[in-house]
Image: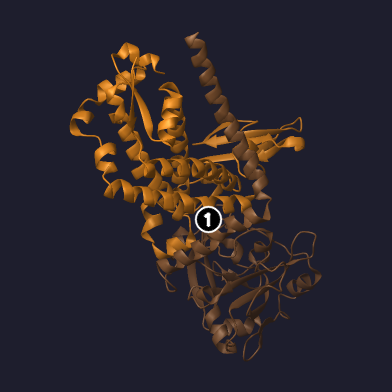
Amino acid sequence: MKALLVYRHRFPTRLSHWVTVLCVPILVLSGFQIFNAHPALYWGERSDGERAVLAMRAERTPRGTLKGITHVFGRDFDTTGVLGASRDGALGIQDRGFPNWATLPGHQWLAMGRRWHFFFAWAFVLNGLAFAGYAVLGGHLSRDLMPSGPELRAIGRALRDHLLFRFHHGAAADRYNVLQKLAYASIIFVAAPLLVLTGLAMSPRVDAAIPALPAVFGGRQSARTLHFLLTLGLIAFTAVHLFMVLVTGFWNNVRSMILGWYRLSSGGPDEDSSAT
Amino acid sequence: MKIQVRLDRRQFARRSLQLAALCLLAGCNRLSRSPSVAALLESAEGLTRRVQRALRPRRSMAREFTEADRSPVFPGNGTTSPEDADYQALAASGFAAWRLEVDGLVERPARLSLGDLRRLPSRTQITRHDCVEGWSAIAKWTGVPLRTILDQVGVGPRARYVVFHCADSMDGTGDRYYESIDFDDALHPQTILAYEINDRPLPIEYGAPLRLRVERQLGYKMAKYVMRVELVETFAAFGRGKGGYWEDRGYEWYAGI
């Protein structure tokens, strides 16, 4: 079988992709560290204790052990070991929102969590702005990321193909398919900016300078809740993204994101699947 | 055979990702303890301060709320009952003997009683208090604008920071709480030394007899139990030199975010 190499990702795309790969895990883990300082979420401007929409807490059982409880929309769930109370090395089960393995640093250290978060938030923002500028001005957005009308009309078929694990590896794979376009464009141009804006809406100085910002999100605590939900969305996207990278030819995908070159296989769909 | 290779590859890829995640965590934890990495991470603070202040300099006002927006319970955070004997003696007499010292790089040092402060023009504001931990609470504060006091004592030409010395000792070390702000916030109309919360004299829990309000920064900047206001050129001589009790323990001096 003949393989054809196509130049799929240009340098700015590859660079900003890997800067994002560095930033996002650090931002998520340090974000959970910050969340742990007050592991509860609210709607509105204030955080009235009894009105939390989500809260993690530890309770002592009659046997003297700690039980982790996650409260979501008025219901309590036992989440011992993961949320609310989890193992902290030799100290045993401790009162923690997210467990140590999901936070940076890996134990309660809010000050350092904030340092990591804000440094990499700047890296994330500057990288995002540079990429957005390149994508808009350089034509990457209109050429590769915006789905066309016919593509959108054929979305049902694309969805079915994906769910049946029928992936295109031939000539069609030198361009993103409609689902990829929608996923990438919404993460880059909707979710990421919203993550930054909801983050900034928690800053008292920014709120004083731009009162409309916390207002559009329904208040500072709502902004904090949305920041958290968007983070969960970003994690879900990353999980699906990594899964798709694995099942559609891991090395081919990774190489194309490092060097730019993506190998297309020629021939029909049957031969295609062997390319993975 | 082919399937076997494919599985091995997938397993390898998965293992690589797991390993990378572990390295990231372990690496970042170790890096957190390295002074040079900490210094690098801290460099973002200056950028944040400059950009946020350039956004709308000086006069931008924190939002003021209505009476109905106030929190049913305002959390008493940090020290809520100083154990220091000198403070307890003052509290026992209803702070009759308490005096606010205003000194340092000023032209006319002053000692002000609560009565003196209450006779000065006051400002009342209903504002949102944002804690570094993540919670927010709204309360009504009444006090003297810091600017009024600074105008009265006369700011010396070399003064760059206003340091607030507090009555409460923290943990077992005997270090008393302190904080500092620069003139960007010190001269801001909403920066007040508050002696009332929700129309009643400040209870001990909230920093009696006097606490600072700096509405465009986080809660830890708003020192409670203020005893002395000192104008300085640098805060390097206080505590561990970072400008505040929590700053000495790794928190940002600029707490606008």
The quadrant the C terminus of chain A occupies is top left
Q: Tell me how many marks there are.
A: 1
Spot the residue most to the bottom. B108
Residue A207 found in image quarter: bottom left
Pointer 1 local density, CA inside 10 Å: few below 14, some 14–19, many at least 20: many
Colour theme:
by chain
Residue A80 found in image quarter: top right
Residue A230: in sight, yes or no?
yes
Residue B120: in sight, yes or no?
no
Image position of B129 with respect to A9: above or below: below
Spot the residue most to the left. A150
Q: Position of residue A17 (x, y in %)?
A: 43, 41
Q: Position of residue A220 (x, y in %)?
A: 46, 54
Image position of B174 with respect to B90: above or below: above
Q: Position of residue A92 (x, y in %)?
A: 74, 34
Q: Which of A21 and B117 is in front in this view?
A: A21
Q: Which chain is mark 1 on?
A: B
The residue under the point 62% across, 44% down is B28
Read off the residue under disc 1.
Answer: B136
The kind of residue tagged 1 is Ser
The residue under the point 54% across, 17% down is B8
Q: Nearer the viewer, residue A230 or A136?
A: A136
Q: Position of residue A208 (x, y in %)?
A: 43, 65
Q: Which of A224 and A131 is in front in this view?
A: A131
Q: Which of A198 and B63 is in front in this view?
A: A198
Image position of B112 with respect to B134: above or below: below
Chain identifier of the orange chain: A
The quadrant the N terminus of chain A occupies is top left
Image position of A169 with respect to A71: above or below: above
Instruction: Give the structural element (helix, strand or loop) at label 1.
Output: strand
Chain identifier of the brown chain: B
